Amino acid sequence: MTELLDQTTNQDTQPYVRSLRELIDLVSGRNIKGSSSSGDSGIAEKTPFPFLALVGQLEMKLALLMALINPAIGGVLLIGPRGTGKTTTVRSLTDLLPEVERSKCFYGCVDEDIIAGGIDAVCPDCAKKFAEGIPLTSLDRVRLVELPLNTTINDVVGGLDERALVNERMRLKRGLLAQADKNLLYIDEINLLSNEITDAILDAAAQGNFTVRRGVISATYRSRFCLIGSMNPEEGNLRPQIMDRFGLRVIVQGLTLPSERHEAYRRVKAYLQNPRQVIAEYATETDFARNDIEQARRLLRKVEIPDKITQTGIALIQALQIDSLRSDINLFESARAYAAIDGRTEVTLDDLKLVAPMALRLRRSKFMNDYLALQQVEQADLLSAFENTSAKFRER
């Protein structure tokens, strides 16, 4: 495998692979070169560990890539003990993020606002630009927005702009939810968030927008983000309301093969000694992977699911006694995303089998099963009592 990569890769030639999935398999098995140390400039830089340099954890990688390619999946929750690479993996997505159309206006005005609500639906500056034929949006890379644990509700939803108040103006400052629009919103240790902030995120995720009211002024912002969360179950459970918002749930465990753990150590050691050199080693493949993600996003529109596959998926969900209709959506949209990753336009039964654990785990509720069973007993008692009572009156 290493020889194949060396023979087929250079700075100008893409590795001869058929799909993004094959590229990940190929590059993940490559041995990293020795890294020489470099002097520390003392300047903090954002140099995330390369996604393609991560060892193992295929399910976690695929889940994150599927969420990038198909936002309809509804986000990813990573569950596992400390030190298993959850946060490192999420941050390593930075170099793979695709481009989206983003508003150039402070208030987030876009052409679709005018199409839906007329020229008065945008601010005066954007109305003038639209009349002059000036685009209101431009291509921009998707960003990773992190929500720290010490954040406040004003940081999340926004508040009054203090700089504007100095000049006796009333203007709202956008919060993290508005900044997360068309981006990835990552929450580490999501199970430790306060209920107030969790409720705000739930509402924004469900509606795709949220309204901020401060005194006499208010503003509504878009918040169409892909939610990624990570948690250590030893530190507490996640509220069912927010658990339900995650389309994919990945159980992250430590590497089990000694060879994988050794290779992971070698790569981390090389990265700590010279992060730029390690990033450069994977730069070519990272560019190819980013292009493949863009192609998969475009291909997704053409991916279809045969009726036989959907019927199989629904039968599986019913056999597992899962009530939520979101499970159907998550299962089928995940299968479509995986087919796009593999460069195909039709979902197969193997696709469904591969994504089913990620899409359907942790959806059954013992409480709800017991509750519904009791309701069925009560329903039977009510019908029996009705029959007995009505029979007595018929005898009279």
Image (tube, rainbow, N blue to C red):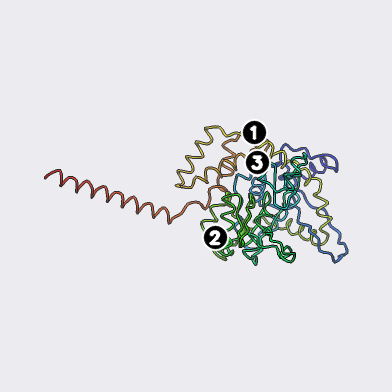
Does the rendering let one see residue 129?
Answer: yes
What is the CA distance from the residue labelled 3 to the residue labelled 2? Answer: 42 Å
Q: Is residue 289 visible?
A: no
Q: Kindly indicate the quadrant of the structure image that contains residue 285.
A: top right
Considering the numbered disc 1 on the image, is that residue within a helix, a strand or a loop?
A: helix
Earlier in the chain: of badge 3 and badge 2, it is 3
Residue at 15 percent across and 46 percent down: it is 393
Above or below, 1 relative to 87: above
Q: Which residue is mark 2?
A: 238
Q: Residue at x 67, y 46 (%)?
A: 68
Q: Quadrant of residue 165?
A: bottom right
Dot 2: element: loop
Q: Does residue 294 sit above or below 240 in this rendering?
A: above
Q: 205 or 316, which lies in front?
A: 205
Q: Is residue 199 left or right of residue 104?
A: left
Q: Which residue is mark 3?
A: 118
The amino acid marked with disc number 3 is: Gly
From mark 1 to mark 3, how far is it between C-alphas? 32 Å
Mark sitting on residue 237: none
**Residue under numbered circle 1:** 302
Quarter that holds the C terminus: top left
Under mark 2, the amino acid is Leu
Question: Contact, CB < 8 Å: mark 3 with mark 2?
Answer: no
Viewer-side label of 3, 2: 3
Q: Are circles 1 and 2 on residues that touch, CB within 8 Å?
A: no
- Closer-to-camera residue (79/178): 178
Spot occupied by residue 346 in the image (x, y as percentages of width and height): 61, 33
Please tell me whether mark 3 sits on a helix, a strand or a loop: loop
First in sequence: mark 1 vs mark 3: 3
- Dot 1 or dot 2, earlier in sequence: 2
Mark 1 crowd level (few <14, some 14–19, many ≥20, 10 Å Cα): few
Q: Residue at x 59, y 48 (%)?
A: 74
